[in-house]
Amino acid sequence: MPDQPTTPHTLIIGAGLAGLACARRLTETGLTCTVLEASDGIGGRARTDRVAGFQLDRGFQVFLTGYPEARKTLNYAALDLMPFHPGALIRYAGRFHVMSDPFRRPQDLPQTLLSPIGSLADKFRMLRMRRDTLQQHLCTAMKDPARTTHHVLLAYEFSEAMVRHFFRPFLSGVFLETELKTPCWIFERVWAAFCRGATALPRDGMGAIAQQLAAPLPPGTIRFNQAVEQIEGSSVVLKSGERLTAHILVVATDHATASRLRGEHVPNTSARGSMTLYFDAPTPPRRGPWLIVNGEGDGVVRTVCVLSEAAPSYAPPGRALISVTTTEQVDAHDELPHTVRLYLRSWFGPQVDEWRHLRTDHIPHALPPIDALAPGSLTTSSRVDAGLYLCGDYRESGTLDGALVSGRKAAEAILSDYASSRPVAASAS
């Protein structure tokens, strides 16, 4: 009798969201896999730590419920998502000004229209861009999906003041770059997600997303503290010296690590980093689940958010958890918490002197380099060699949703390749 086909086993390097999405899709179809994670936990950049009764995500993060892949993949009810107000408070000219989505928070429409952030014409341009984004016409109108976000704003004829006091500070907190060089196709997807759904936090922190992805995996699927040193053919060599061999390898790491493991030249591009300081306060400096954006164009602070106003589970009863993100020019140093508090005194008064610094998260590789992303939303194949596949947010849009898409696509490519390699049973004659 001919040999029966062997069910392939897959090794996945990395238990971030892309690797977990790939593993879950494979196991749903009955294929076996092992996930090798270099650290002591899952989630990669989407992890949550418990510190002194507070939930601290690894750097300031929010979840956009309007992401299409996340909607299909995740159980939102189980995540118990807690929303922010749709929009932001902009600090400008010594005051806080409301910029809200009138479709989801109509009670803020008068304040939004009358705010000095941009002109009245700018507010109507926002509505036009919202419509075009939701209808996926924005990049079509630009005629080039690789054009920058800055070019998009120019094409919609937003005033310089609107760009300087709203778009640049708001989007620099989203894309972690101030020049608005993010390609149009990524801006369209992210802006549509903002417009389509809520900006929220899972009750148990951003790490709950990874936990949900990993929950269906069979026990023992994920091996922790298993750092991979290199890939050799169909084998991986761990830093411990152990060698593991599988039919299929999936590299679900950041772009630089993936290149290094494959023995390629590590790209000389800079990842987009973030700096977040967490503070414990006796009372919130502002009530309500708002993202507060620095529209002044000065100082070390980029955004302020009282996380416990959106998700009370992030702080012990009677306390407030405040996250402060800084501009990219700031370096982490011992005096940074004092510098931040000193700056925010002009916003909130002397109450900031009571804030207790909990932790500073410096994430050098919070987002992949823009140069590493697929140009113009071109779909890149997950398969890079026989039995070798890549996935990660850098393979798509550089977003949480992109990580989920990339993991699914890698799994589907494996399933397609495996199905095509199976012998077809001969029909009875």
Image (cartoon, helix red, strand yellow):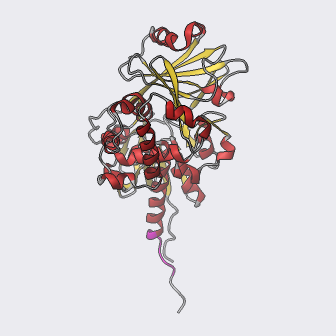
Q: Residue at x 49, y 71 (%)?
A: 3
In front: 170, or 20? 170
Residue occupying the point 54% across, 17% down: 359
Magenta extent: 420-425
Q: Quadrant of residue 299?
A: top left
The image shows a total of numbered marks equal to 0
209 vs 402, left or right, is right
Give x and y (percent) for residue 31.
55, 58
Give the image location of residue 210, x and y in percent.
58, 41
Residue 79, image quadrant: top right
Q: Residue at x 37, y 49 (%)?
A: 185
83 vs 324: above or below: below
- Quick check: is 424 in the magenta stretch? yes
Question: In the picture shown, does residue 44 fall above or below 51?
Answer: below
User: What residue occupies the far right of the structure in this picture?
Assistant: 317
206 or 13, nearer to the observer: 206
Q: Classify residue 212 as left or right of residue 170.
A: right
Q: Residue at x 45, y 12 (%)?
A: 336
Picture layout, residue 169 above or below residue 71: above
